[in-house]
Image (cartoon, rainbow, N blue to C red):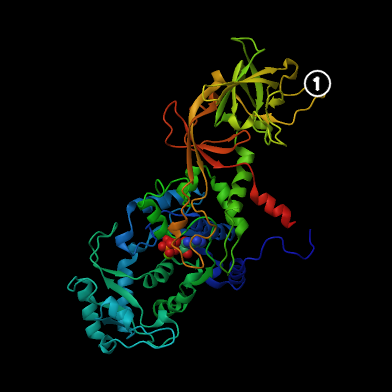
Amino acid sequence: MDNGVKTTPSNFIRDIIEEDIRSNKNGGQVVTRFPPEPNGYLHIGHAKSICLNFGLARQYGGRCHLRMDDTNPEKETVEYTDSIINDVRWLGFDWGEHLYYASDYFEQIYQWGVLLIGKGVAYVCDMSPDEVSATRGTPTAPGTESPGRKRSVEENLYLFSRMRAGEYPDGSRTLRARIDMSSPNMHLRDPVLYRIKRAEHHRTGNAWCIYPMYDFAHGQSDYIEGITHSICTLEFEVHRPLYDWFLDKIAEAGRVRPRQIEFARLNLSYTVMSKRKLLELVESGSVRGWDDPRMPTISGLRRRGYTPEAIRDFADRIGVAKADNMVDVALLEHCLREDLNRRAPRVMAVLNPLKVVIENYPEGATEELEAINNPEDESMGKRKVPFARVVYIEKDDFREDPPPKYFRLAPGREARLKFAYYITCTGVVKDDKGEIVEIRCVYDPTTRGGWSNDGRKVKGTLHWISAEDAIEAEVRLYDHLFTVPEPENTKDGTDYRTFINPDSLKVLTRCLVESSVKGAKPGSRFQFERLGYFCVDPDSRRGAPVFNRTVMLRDTWAKIEKSAR
Ligand code: ATP
Ligand code: MG
């Protein structure tokens, strides 16, 4: 189909890479990296970056490194590092032998500090962090030069080596680049390269008491690894002149020189995406942990029942752009539904059970009926579900006084039990408080399988479960973690925590599930007929399964797309 309209959205990063390959820049190689800071768990925004970086490497026959950007020891831990490695692998990407740590480059980065001093473009400054920021000026007014700027190369080399040796207190001195205190770009106003901080590092221990700043570590790490395309989010666009300034000073002829390219970060409706805020949610107990199924973290999504395929599909569909935007979480859910629809076996479960006694079904009798495991995939076959005199249906599927357009069961009405029979309600049994505790029905034996051969139609089809086939389960229903689409971005600057949804978790304890799910491993996913997709939670104990509702069946995104057409 060639009507002159591009079907895949143009991707400016691919355009750049293809141009570089055409001009044989870097010998036509493509080397990318995903560089998380191990100070939290990865989230769906990171997944976008992971899919992009690993995807480009795969597409152009290059490679993608996984690099821990661990230059900030106070907030980084081994737990976070391990979770990152696990999550990237789970998403389906492989870095081969290319797992790196910026902390492994500390010596080389230090030597580059020495090199810059030798070139007269870095100096030791005696100001405190507060003084450094107070003298930086404003976007419209130039900053003030530090007295350290006038130091000789020798004195700077001496002081820098003393900083490393631990002779000065924390925060008392820094190494700064000597660039331009009146640059319109604040990042070029003699940025700090090194700070003194006695903090034990999770990998280098106490070997260092000075640590490089992000800007003096990131591009340098890219350079060491031979990264060709250093892809990052838009907020680093203003750092790019500095990224290039450092490379101008350190890069040697004949070596790959990385190029920084920025793209818009993912924002997703009804959630927050900053690691600091996600940590606050965990620490304040607003959620049960980093892997709470309501969290936008990869581990939360996994526990919720997301598949790596659905997340990768989502990343493909949102594409990459140069302008910030907000993506509807309904699109993410849509990608998940499409994937689970193809692969999740169907079972019957009743979340709010209502007892049904089928009066004309013989006591003690039972029979096996055939149920289809997945109408989307015949190869998944059929299973037998037992039918008997006592079955359970959903409370919601019965009304004593049905409103107009209610097509399910009501006194005197006939409805279909899926894969089973037509039943007609003949009466209700109530307790002394007037609550319905049981309904009485009769079934039509000629409708076995759920179809009548006299052409009689029923409008309602109900899921059900027979008493002897039912096992009890806990089911956790989730809603958005926030009550508004953009909790981080309100006109009056209201704190995002104001919008935490108090009803984001609802626990149902006495649900009934088909016994065929018994023993399903945590992470197993099912479609509960008519209810949605559910996934076995690791909290399941033997005989007492716990399910998370992954996503409901109703697809709001498909509706949006349809009305757009
Ligand atoms: P913070 O939330 O503390 O600002 P961060 O999310 O930027 O941190 P990093 O560990 O530095 O965390 O991110 C690793 C990589 O993931 C970076 O290249 C970053 O640009 C990218 N990234 C982070 N958030 C998003 C997002 N929402 N969308 C796309 N990419 C992202
Ligand atoms: Mg960051």
Figure quarter occupied by ligand 2:
bottom left
For the point 32% across and 81% down, the residue is 134
Residue 224: x and y in percent read 40, 68
At 47% across and 76% down in the image, what residue appears? 238
Can you name the residue that lies furthest to the bottom here? 150
Image vertical order of residue 376 relative to residue 82, above or below: above
How many residues crowd around disc 1 within 10 Å: few (fewer than 14), some, or many (20 or more)?
few
Is the residue 172 above or below the residue 303 in the image?
below
Residue shown at the point (37%, 53%) measured from the top left:
80
Front-most of residues 179 and 421: 421
The residue where tag 1 is placed is: 453
User: Residue 334 location in percent, x, y?
Assistant: 62, 49
Identified at 74% across, 19% down, the residue is 447
Q: Disc 1 residue type?
A: Asn
Evaluate whether residue 252 shows in this view.
no
Task: Residue 182: name its quadrant.
Answer: bottom left
Q: Is mark 1 within 8 Å of ligand 1?
A: no
| Residue 207 position within the rendered picture, expressed as x and y whole percent measured from the top left | 23, 63
Viewer-proximal residue among 517 and 492: 492
Left or right of 248, for residue 18: right
